[in-house]
Amino acid sequence: MAYTRNHNFIFMLIPFLVILTTTSFASAEVLLFSAKHVTIINKLVTRATLIVHCRNKGDDLGVVSLGPGDSMDFRFRVNLRDTTVYSCSFAWPGNTATFDIFRADRDDNPKSKAGVCSECIWSIYEPAPCRDRRDGGQPNCFPWDGFGLI
């Protein structure tokens, strides 16, 4: 009886693996729970210190102080529903801003303007956060979600 159950399991597993390896779902970019690495770089033109606080529903990354040119990074996996969002608040002398530094619908979606990134590198400038392109082309800049003067 154990032999029959193992045989049936293997019989079902092999076609599944063949389908998985021959479809686009095998791509690392679209696999469920795809690994992401976000890097945030302080590129404020004023060369001011940037205070960054990033979090999502279940993970608070704490407050980090970045000097001019300094960076911070974090890693995670996109959730099963592909709804992962990491939101960050940014502060520098006289200003505060917020921005969703990772949104699955923007950063893990091949149909989005910015495309998929597994290494998501963000340069933070006063006017806008910009996601750098791996090919060295023009970065994708986005408006702040919220911006205020102190």
Image (cartoon, helix red, strand yellow):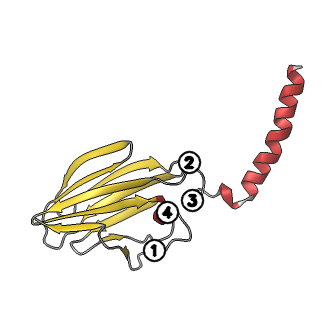
CA–CA distance between discs 4 and 1?
A: 22 Å
Quarter of the view holding residue 8:
top right
Q: What residue type is labelled 1?
A: Asp
Q: How far apart are marks 4 and 2 (CA)?
A: 13 Å
> Which x, y percent locates residue 48?
12, 65
Of marks 1 and 3, the one in the foreground: 3
For residue 128, above or below residue 98 = below
Label 2: which secondary element: loop
Q: Is residue 8 left or right of residue 21?
A: right
Q: Which of marks 1 and 3 is nearer the N terminus?
A: 3
The quarter in which the C terminus is drawn is: bottom left
Rendered residue at 82%/33% (across/down): 9
Q: What element carries label 3?
A: loop
Tell which tag, 4 or 1, sits nearer the viewer.
Answer: 4
Residue 66 coordinates in the image, percent (x, y) = 19, 56
Under tag 1, what secondary structure?
A: loop
Q: Which residue is disc 4 drawn over?
A: 105
Q: Residue 80 carries which label?
A: 2
What separation in Å lies between label 1 and label 3 (alpha carbons)? 17 Å
Quadrant hosting residue 143: bottom left
Q: How crowded is mark 4: few (under 14 residues within 10 Å), some or many (20 or more)?
A: some
Percent from the top left, x then y, of residue 128? 28, 73
Label 3 Cα neighbours within 10 Å, binned few <14 / some 14-19 / many ≥20: some
Residue position for label 1:
135
Look at discs 3 and 4 and give the one toward the viewer. 4
Query: Mark 2 is on which residue type?
Result: Leu
Which mark, residue 31?
none
Q: Mark 3 points at which residue?
A: 29
Q: First in sequence: mark 3 or mark 2?
A: 3
Q: Residue at x 23, y 55 (%)?
A: 52
Q: In which quarter of the image is residue 101?
A: bottom left
